[in-house]
Amino acid sequence: MKNLYAVIRRPIITEKGNLQKELNNKVTFEVHPDATKQEIKTAVEKFFKVRVLNVHSLNQRGKVKRVGRFFGKRRNWKKAIVTLGPNDKIEFFEGV
């Protein structure tokens, strides 16, 4: 991938993610399925102006869901857990 704006899709804000952010300085993002760890690291450093120490990425398989008698499947997606430097911080909801 050459376009860094397509790498990061959205932050994942959950209770577990907030706990990781407070205790271990880790932030979770949904990323493009073809993105590599190096591209994720470069995009986060460029957009949020922080230092990235480590990137863990994993592919999430879509769940099979049922509506009445019909079955469907959610899409597959990729998640990245980014470890930030000790003095760096990313705030998604400032002043709330």
Image (cartoon, helix red, strand yellow):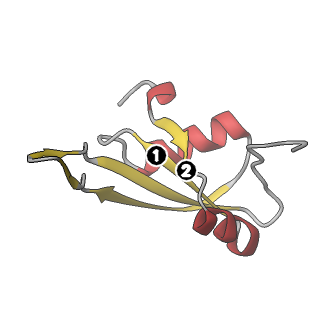
Please report whichever mark, 2 or 1, sits nearer to the chain's N-terminal start: 2
Relative height, residue 40 to residue 46 (above, below) = below
Count of marks placed on residues: 2
Q: Amino acid at mark 2?
A: Ile
Quarter of the rendering occupied by the N terminus: top left
Residue at the far bottom: name it.
23
Q: Which residue is mark 2?
A: 12
User: Which residue is at 71% across, 66% downward?
Assistant: 25
Image coordinates for residue 2, horizontal then vertical, percent:
39, 26
User: Which residue is at 60% across, 63% downward?
Assistant: 17
Q: Residues within 10 Å of mark 1 (few under 14, many from 20)?
A: many
User: Going by the image, does 12 lie left or right of 25?
Assistant: left
Q: Which residue is mark 1?
A: 30
Q: Amino acid at mark 1?
A: Glu
Which image quarter: residue 52?
bottom right
Image coordinates for residue 7, horizontal then vertical, percent:
45, 35
Q: Nearer the viewer, residue 31 or 45?
A: 31
